[in-house]
Image: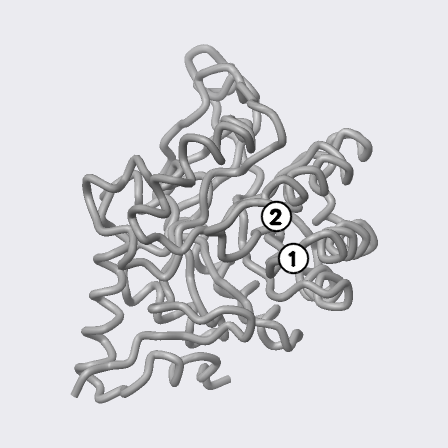
Amino acid sequence: MKTDLSVDLGFLKLRNPVLAASGTFGYGTEFAPFLDLSALGGVVVKGLYYGPREGNPPPRIVETASGMINAIGLQGVGVEAFAADVLPELRKAGASVWVNVCGEDEDEYLRVIGFLDRLDGLAAYELNISCPNVKRNGLCPALRADWTFDLVRAAKARSRRPVVAKLSPNVTDIVEIARAAERAGADGVSLVNTFLAMAIDPETRRPRLANGFGGLSGPAIKPIALRMVYQAASAVKIPVIGMGGVMTGRDAVEFLIAGAKAVEVGTANFVDPASTVRVIGDIEAFCLERGIARVSDLVGTVRI
């Protein structure tokens, strides 16, 4: 028996439920020597602002127990360089390309979408509403339901492609934010982004990151991410894409059982450049060993 790994998000069908997470996979082309990009359910490219962005000063990454903290600052090439230099290579590789859309204010989000809408070869937008917003004193839209609603609604009105809202875990009620994105017309939600964190050097008594704070990711956050994915999937009808510490196929299966229809692999890419295809293989083996005909049969089957 062969397991059917395909999943239907409603707005898009994926060959399997595993995507490479934005910010951990570069623009995808960097990983082409290590794996077949067309074998993934999708490649969510590094976050794009309209113009190029330098990001934060170094040091920008520090390892922690069972994870890492980054303060890269969403460094990127901008939409024009992406269209000219990156997207053609991703098309040649046969990748299903998702773009993580960023903006310092609502106008920039819409400008990025407007530019990308003129291009061919893109599957969907992941709206990174966890970006710091200059008009909100550096607070990201995903911290409040009303800000989330307004930005997602504006993006959907502007976009000719599916829009998946990427939510922040740094909130007291993830359900409220997920429901706001759904009411605004989001085609799906992805969660979680990184948790606000810091590390201190006890010798110098200074933060290990030049930025002071950064985002914690990796296995350390999986239990919390899993809880939030379960809560969101139980509360909305739109598909949920889960992420946060997926290192193995069994980790991915846990997110599917919690209610996610697909997963994104992030920090694992720093450990093993081919981790995404390994996770796909692990999921298939899990299903085959248990006689599960379709991976989608796992979704939302947690027993509580």
Q: Which mark is residue 160?
A: 1
Q: Secondary structure at mark 1?
A: loop
Name the residue: 31% across, 46% down. Answer: 92
Question: Is 135 placed left or right of 46 in the picture?
Answer: right
Question: Is 283 placed left or right of 57 in the picture?
Answer: left
Q: x, y (%) of residue 88? A: 39, 40
Q: Quadrant of the N terminus?
A: bottom left
Name the residue: 60% across, 45% down. Answer: 118
Name the residue: 60% across, 58% down. Answer: 161
The answer to which quarter of the image holds residue 263 is bottom left
The answer to which quarter of the image holds residue 279 is bottom left
The local crowd at label 1, few if under 14, some if 14 to 19, many if 20 or more residues have their Cα within 10 Å, is some
Name the residue: 34% across, 63% down. Answer: 251
Q: x, y (%) of residue 59? A: 44, 17
Q: x, y (%) of residue 24? A: 39, 40
- The amino acid at mark 1 is Arg
Question: Is 111 placed left or right of 290 in the picture?
Answer: right
Above/below status of 42 relative to 139: below
Residue hosting label 2: 117
Above/below status of 293 relative to 59: below
Are dots 1 and 2 in contact, CB under 8 Å? Answer: yes
Q: Nearer the viewer, residue 118 or 301?
A: 118
- The amino acid at mark 2 is Asp
Q: Which mark is residue 100?
A: none
Question: Is 295 placed left or right of 82 in the picture?
Answer: left
The answer to which quarter of the image holds residue 63 is top left
